[in-house]
Amino acid sequence: MDRLALTPLRNLAIAIGFVVIVSAFSTAAYVHAGWSFGDAVYMVLLTIYTVGYGEVHPIDTPYLHGVTIATMIFGCTGMILVTGALVQSLTVYQIREILGTNRVKTEIAKLKRHVVVCGFGRIGVMLARELAAAKTPFLVVERDEKRFEEARALGYLALMGEATHEEVLLAAGVERASVLATVLPDDAANVFITLSGRSLNKALRIIARGESPSTETKLIQAGADKVVMPTHIGAERIAEMILFPETARVIRGSERMREFEKVLVDLGLEMEVVVATAEGQAVGITIAELEQRAAGAFFVVQVNPRAGEPVARPDPGRVVQAGDGLVVVGRDGCEFNAVFTEPAARPRAGRTTY
């Protein structure tokens, strides 16, 4: 089908080029006969487009007769070719759209016990990649045209539409699906999609993404079987890394750390070390209180006491002491220190370097 579309476009380009060449030679011929450039161009356009307003100057010499006849023959022929190629291009484009739409509908109709992935953002791309690697049938639902085309370019079966609309979920075959994964960055949209999916298929397993910790309860109440929070996932992966007996100094530059850092970037997360000073708000409160005060902006995955060994996956009830280094992970661009700024002085912070 791509080769079919290429032929009329190539023909159109050739026809336009032919008309341009004929127009240039005809204009030069009229100028050679003593006409001004403007009159020559005007006469060529009248002749090629067969408007018939009349001659700009008298055509009273054999030379002008020959130029005009040649312009009529070759110019009109070129315009016919341009029109034909243009119509052919539009026709092929429409055929491609019809065949492409029908093909997608046919493939979706064949799907059974598949996975419906709502959203092809950062998380959706990672999810689709893993499903494709596992050869699990899935369908991507994306409202953004650019991301929709990206999914199609990767060879994924994709449907363009707003997943919050029930008709789009029905078109995605959610009634026959086994899993619905709604991974949009908008918590409200994920709640609505969860409600719609549950009402359309009671047996559907729904996995929903949540950004704010307060959304988890709402998603569960809406019908989600599992709520996944990217920040929590990042925190767990960091904890897995630092649970190894090697210290951070040994881990630095290792292949595993580089792989881990790539995962963080894919999840839109970053890691920092915040040192709790005696004047800061963090001192004297528990880690659970600290995370609650941050409203889900970050999570503490390790505490490096001033004296003693680092504590990975610290107990939520552990009290932060002055001089403790807190390894925190949070959303990319998050101001990790903001929770310490009011009313106490802002604690000293530094970014870890690997």
Image (tube, rainbow, N blue to C red):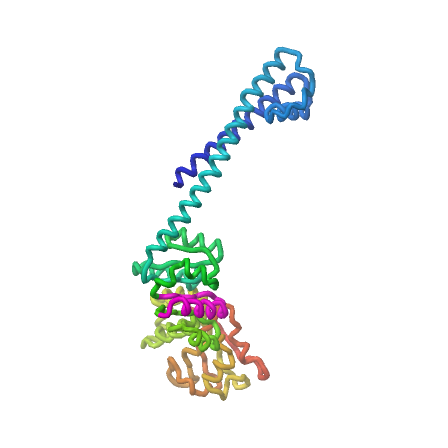
At 43% across and 53% down in the image, what residue appears? 150
Q: Nearer the viewer, residue 200 or 240?
A: 200
Q: Position of residue 340 (x, y in %)?
A: 54, 80
Q: Nearer the viewer, residue 72 or 345?
A: 72
Q: Position of residue 165 (x, y in %)?
A: 48, 62
Q: Quarter holding the C terminus?
A: bottom left
Q: Is residue 144 visible?
A: yes
Is 346 rendered above or below residue 76?
A: below
Residue 324 lies within the magenta run:
no
On screen, residue 25 versus residue 148, left or right, reads right
At 61% across and 19% down in the image, what residue appears? 29
Q: Position of residue 48 (x, y in %)?
A: 59, 25
At 45% across and 78% down in the image, what residue appears? 217
Number of marks drawn: 0
Residue 192 lies within the magenta run:
yes
Q: Is residue 273 visible?
A: no
Residue range corresponding to the magenta coloring: 179-202
Is 3 rendered above or below residue 168?
A: above
Q: Position of residue 57 (x, y in %)?
A: 69, 18
On screen, residue 75 versus residue 91, left or right, reads right
At 35% across and 71% down in the image, what residue appears? 251
Instruction: Report the residue that reaches farthest toward the left.
Output: 135
Q: Quarter holding the N terminus?
A: top left
Q: Quadrant of residue 68?
A: top right
